Amino acid sequence: MEIDEKLTPTDLLPKIDRLWAASGGKIESIEQTCPPSEGAPVFTVDGRYTARGWTEWTEGFRYGAALLQFDATGDERFLTIGRDATFERMASHVSHVGVHDHGFTNVSTYGALLRLLHEGRVEGDRAAYEIALKVSGAVQAARWRTTADGTGYIYSFNGPQSLFVDTIRSCRALAMAHQLGHVLMGEQDKPVSLLGRLVEHAANTAKWNIFHGTGRDRYDVRGRTAHESIFNVNDGAFRCPSTQQGYSAFTTWTRGLAWAMAGYPELLEWVATRSDEELETVGGRESVTAMMLDAATATCDFYLANTPTDGVPYWDTGAPGLAAMGDYLDRPADPFNDHEPVDSSAAAIAAQGLLRLGRYLGDAGTKYWQAGLTVCDTLFGEPYLSTDPSHQGLLLHSVYHWPNGWDHVAPGQRVPNGEACMWGDYHLREVALYVGRVARDEPYYTFFGGSR
């Protein structure tokens, strides 16, 4: 990747304003054409959002996007859409025991409303938002499997054998609930620390899903990620890497990489707000911070080394068609190539991770900060930003599940392109809000801004 070392957040404001101008009409169009009874919209086909039954994990992004639109523009129409739908549609997600997505669904909705309330931007029932977030964090933490060393992880919807790299970004649900003073109550009224489970999950994700190039990982490349780690459910022993949406267990699915890139820096920011006394219960500030920082820098470094010059990756760094594309890392990504799809949604997620890590490190993080701005500069313009009002997507050229063949391939094309997904659109809006607030010297945007 080629990093623009001179780019500033202020430089991006004209593109950000254009993004928000295009965004609002797309949110309203989705509200008109995607009734909730037909399932949560997932990705576009010929520019129109469609549902895809697996889990309804994108519903929080749908209504969270409206809240981001209100946050950025002050347009009350979008506050009404997001707030009303949160109360009408999201309660089942709060108590959903079958998924690992609570940080995606509930922090993007109830958490956003609580944050806006604390910022004085909205009025509302604080207790309702807080109760929803407390329950959500505890329910997510209850999806627990103990490993051979006595620690554990939050298991994915695939079952107790499965640790997804994705879930690190969803740990924000545990963070919010803990910060609100909540615990998970177990058998015989035994309290279970949500902070403890968050740290153990983060440590096991860093240990088993992220390769560090030393020790057990001496054969592999530092920063590479495995989408899934498989454990023996009888004794908790690690068995092997795996993948659901990547090319193989030994290649890097770039959206999974991006979830780690965003998840760890975000948690580092949150850990920095916690007291030494709290952190002593989970090994101490130095230990927790070192673990998360190592995972964050390793994954971000891998992204920088394995992404085309404009900061947009192909869907998997080991995808077989890349071998036919020559020096594909030495030029901008090509969404219209004949071999492998790019994934702009991975770039939108990764950009926020790069920015947060860069800010966290201060002067030592300039490389990451500038890389994040560079990715944003690419995504906030053509051919990625969709300003066409007839297309319901905002961020073009994303993929969902290429191995399953779920993504739409237009006539005359050999790979999916020109389409959008709900999480890509959401994270493009989220990083635009982030950069816009920094540029205008507004309150720094974090997921935990609405917690006490």
Image: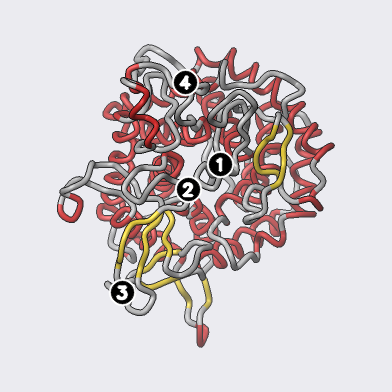
Q: CA distance from mark 1 to mark 3?
A: 35 Å
Residue 334 bears which disc, if any?
4
Task: Please state which amino acid type lies under the numbered disc 3.
Answer: Gly
Residue that label 2 marks: 245
Point 19% across, 45% down: residue: 213
Task: Determine the secondary structure under disc 3.
Answer: loop
Rate crowding at label 3 as few (under 14), some (14 to 19) or many (20 or more) other CA atoms within 10 Å.
Answer: few
Task: Determine the secondary structure under disc 1.
Answer: loop
Residue that label 1 marks: 400
Q: Spot the residue most to the front.
A: 412
Residue that label 3 marks: 150
Q: Position of residue 356 (x, y in %)?
A: 42, 35
Of mark 3 and mark 2, the one earlier in the sequence is 3
Judge from the rendering whether residue 232 lies leftward or rightward of residue 127; answer left or right: left
Point 55% across, 62% down: residue: 137
Task: Please state which amino acid type lies under the numbered disc 1.
Answer: Tyr
Rate crowding at label 2 as few (under 14), some (14 to 19) or many (20 or more) other CA atoms within 10 Å.
Answer: many
Any part of residue 274 in sight = no
